[in-house]
Amino acid sequence: MTDRVYDFARCTNEDAVMSENAQSRLWNAGYTKTWVGNFLIFFSFMLMQPAFPLYLSDEFHADAETIGWVMVGYSITAIVIRLFSGYIVDSYPRRMVLVGSYVLFALCFLGYPLAGSLLMIAIVRTLHGAPFGLTTVSNSTVAVDFLPFSRRAEGIGYYGLSNNLAMAIAPAVGLCLYGVFYDFRVLMWGSIAIAALGLLLTISIRFPRPRPKEHAPLRVRNILLWKGWSFGLVVICSAFSYGVVSTYIALYGKEELGITGGTGGFFFLFAAGLILSRLVGSRSLRRGRIIRNGTVGVLLGLTGYALFAAVPAVWAFYTSAFFMGLGNGHMFPALQTMFMNIVSREQRGTANSTLLVSWEFGVGIGTLCGGALVHVAGYHTAFWVAGFINLCGVVHYVLHSRRDFKRKRLC
């Protein structure tokens, strides 16, 4: 099954054609600023991430369980706000939503140096998840608005590189700064400065004149993109597998393979595969090969999870990480493009929100189920279950999602 290249005659989305006529360059000013803005969102947030548990332990003498609850707080609020982010982005002027959420995101960083107790730190961390969730959804939606139609899929692929690079670089920079100064306040103020820079850049974006909007009622059908359920299910299956493996990778490496410092190497290779596939896959997406890119991605990901579960060896441990990264880097932009191409401009926020909620939901379920499986049946059973769920997602994509996209696509 092959893809058809983009054909404007098949496009029923007037906005897409208008975008193509208005600007044909991929790296136009609006898209470039949203790309950098997204990089700074994730860089500022991830700069504190690896040293945060050390700070909680050293400064407030928090135990492992308490640290876990503090760390997970932002994830809960991010998921909750993302359920409504699509509705907000699609119902109100996007400039107002993006700039407003970015302001709140940057201001939340000021709460960390001002918090004087573990409880206040936990509150700030939990509240921070709300503007983080809304800002990431609104920024990615605005980025798609600036993409010329014929290069939308390619642009989505490159856009993912912004947070991939930030998540690969920022933790290393954060740990380096913490090792030099051994003062978490340096990271706090560094994150504040980076977030402020991103806010200034976002304010400078010249948004197109907003169209008059009729506010749709806040109903369940307007919160998530239900006609994208087929693609969301594939994302959930992949995220489930990632949630199981990523959460217990360090313990498994140490207890089963005798790898004491392997987590960093695993995620480095995962990031390398992710970035490489984004660069290579974007060329394929530029030619309109959305379905093919997704097929390559789910198969590469399945290879990585199967290798990880089937071969309990050090070489498989690292090799599987690279395959998982390659798979995710091909699959995610392809599925995001599918979401974007079955909706009009007025529903892009809902489509983005559904994609991100599907991923967060899958990771959360994978983490919880993985813990129960490891406790009851051991690591290998948990990893085989992760591989099986991933296989279910691949089968569903091959047998249903590809045809579903061809049937529903507007462009």
Image: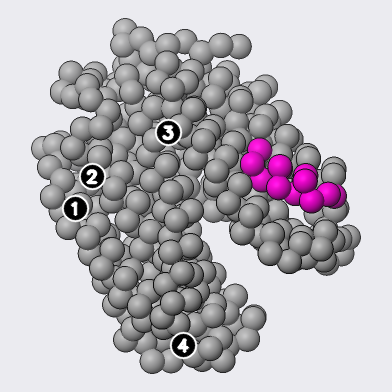
Of the two numbered discs 3 and 2 on the same chain, state the one appearing first in sequence: 2
Q: Which residue is mark 2?
A: 33
The residue under the point 27% across, 45% down is 34
Mark 3 / mark 1, whichever is N-terminal: 3
Residue under label 3: 157
Q: Quadrant of the N terminus?
A: top right
According to the image, what is the colour scheme of the structure? Answer: one colour
Marks 1 and 2, the one that precedes in the sequence: 2
Answer whether residue 408 is visible to the viewer in this image.
no
Which residue is at the far right? 377
Kind of residue at badge 1: Leu
- What is the crowding at mark 1: few (fewer than 14 residues within 10 Å), some, or many (at least 20)? some
Q: Which numbered disc flags the more N-terminal residue, 1 or 4?
A: 4
The relative height of residue 112 versus residue 318 in the rendered view (above or below) is below
Q: What residue appears at the point 70 percent right and 53 percent down from the top-left corner?
A: 245
Q: CA distance from mark 3 to mark 1?
A: 22 Å
**Badge 4 local density, few (<14 within 10 Å), some, or many (20+)?**
few
User: Please, is residue 9 above or below residue 250 in the view?
Assistant: above
Percent coordinates x, y for residue 79 in the rendering: 48, 58
In this rendering, the label closer to the viewer, 4 or 3: 3
Asked whether, in this view, residue 298 is left or right of residue 82, the answer is right
Are the two marked residues, 1 and 2, in contact with CB atoms closer than 8 angstroms?
Answer: yes
Work out how far the residue at label 2 is from the one at label 4, CA to CA, in angstroms. Answer: 36 Å
N-term mark: 4 or 3: 4
Q: Position of residue 299 (x, y in %)?
A: 67, 29
Q: Which mark is residue 201?
A: 1
Left or right of residue 153: residue 255? right
- Magenta residues? 312-323
